[in-house]
Amino acid sequence: MKILVDENMPYAGDLFRRLGEVKAVPGRPIPAAELADADALMVRSVTKVNEALLSGTPIKFVGTATAGTDHVDEQWLQQAGIGFSAAPGCNAIAVVEYVFSSLMLLAERDGFDLRDRTVGIVGVGNVGSRLQVRLEAWGVKTLLCDPPRADRGDDGEFLPLEDLVRDADVLTFHTPLFKDGPYKSWHLADEEVISRLKPGTILINACRGPVVDNAALLRRLEAGQPLSVILDVWEPEPDLDVALLEKVDIGTAHIAGYTLEGKARGTTQVFEAFSDFIGKRQQVALDTLLPAPEFGRITLHGPLDQSILKRLIHLVYDVRRDDALLRKVAGIPGEFDKLRKNYLERREWSSLYVQCDDDQAATLLQKLGFNAVHHPIR
Ligand SMILES: NC(=O)C1=CN([C@@H]2O[C@H](COP(=O)(O)OP(=O)(O)OC[C@H]3O[C@@H](n4cnc5c(N)ncnc54)[C@H](O)[C@@H]3O)[C@@H](O)[C@H]2O)C=CC1
Ligand SMILES: O=C(O)C(=O)[C@H](O)COP(=O)(O)O
């Protein structure tokens, strides 16, 4: 059995080799000749998976090691009898930590306490709900918008987008990209929505570029609308508008989900799904794959305040490094994808063991996702 895997899928070789012959290939585009004799295809978000790619090939299963699935024509796969699995939630923690890293940066730069701000979360799924939990653990008020969940009658107070636009100081988007249908999210933040944002609002898009109308956003910023903007995703990718990048406060190359843990979870989730599909069910413990982190252990004296939390967060991951890397190469063909391919190792907060002599600091850090313990420190 021949299994094609995207070359940007850590641990894929080691895992899929247990099931067959593995060939690592570029994802944008997948070399058509490799598909001619392959049985399974494991992709990332850069590969459009549809009839044009797979018709006439022997592919029987497609896995995407991503949360988003807008690059996959699931309906066609189903009618073609091709098995499919995504990796829901695999990188949700990474995106949450990206958002925190960015907000802590702006809080320090602009001199505000995040706990005095209200954060509007649009899309309260794997990312949005984890973001809500961590923000609330830190004492930040959140407002939630998720029409599909509201329509399903899920617990929680779900508000219309207009309410978040009116009342939130931070508006952060975490929806899938739906180009049409009842929950269309294409240009959810269109020119009208953007123009209604309060002065000083922080606008974040870490889901899919076209959820925010990039041309309209640039027009509003050029017209002097006072916003802070954090964009991890762009319309279009990889050829983002450099003029927009120059106007945003933080701009990165679609890497919000790129922790080692997030990528490893993505790979293991599709590996487990494929092993199940072929009737050779296998499970993988994530910690058997991951190396020791660069910073493994730290001691913290006294209580936790925003400045200390900011330093802890940025010890594990400081978004400025990715912002600087993108600004250096933006506009040069091929460089956006190169940044993503050669992404520097990044870990999740849980990789940092924090020994605290303050009981409350330890409890709070645990709630925020650090591996914290309360222990007297000599
Ligand atoms: N920048 C990056 O590296 C990453 C980006 N993503 C993107 O973020 C999206 C969200 O990720 P997850 O939370 O894991 O997905 P998820 O599927 O768990 O949650 C999405 C939520 O959005 C809600 N939703 C759908 N349409 C909506 C609309 N029109 N308005 C408001 N809410 C709506 C859904 O009901 C659901 O609760 C993914 O679909 C993916 O496109 C995900 C991971 C990494
Ligand atoms: O999981 C998703 O959805 C994402 O957006 C991924 O983080 C994107 O990573 P690639 O699949 O494009 O490497």
Image: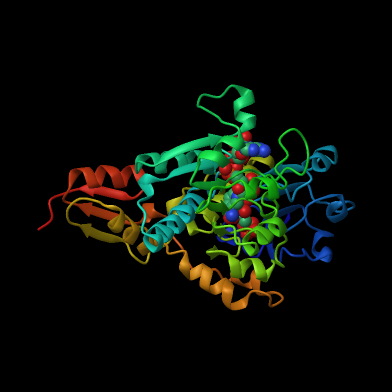
Which of 285/360 is in front?
A: 360
Name the residue nearer the viewer: 151 or 18.
151
Residue 17 visible in the displayed image: no
Task: Residue at 48%, 56% (x, y): give it.
Answer: 98
Q: Is residue 317 left or right of residue 306?
A: right
Q: From the top left corner, tell me how far across and down residue 182 is, in percent.
A: 74, 32
Q: Position of residue 339 (x, y in %)?
A: 59, 71
Identify the image quadrant of residue 188.
Answer: top right
- Looking at the image, the residue that sits furthest to the left is 378
Q: How is the image coloured?
A: rainbow
Q: Residue shown at 69%/78% (left/top)?
A: 332
Residue 212, can we see it? yes
Q: Position of residue 195 (x, y in %)?
A: 64, 50
Q: Nearer the viewer, residue 19 or 166?
A: 166
Q: For the C terminus, which image quadrant?
A: bottom left
Residue 330 spot, x, y in % from top left: 64, 74
Question: Considering only vertical position in the picture, is 130 above or below 311?
Answer: above
Q: Quadrant of the N terminus?
A: bottom right
Residue farthest to the right? 56
Residue 154's place in the image compared with 107, above or below, is: above
Of the four image quadrants, the one with ligand 2 is bottom right
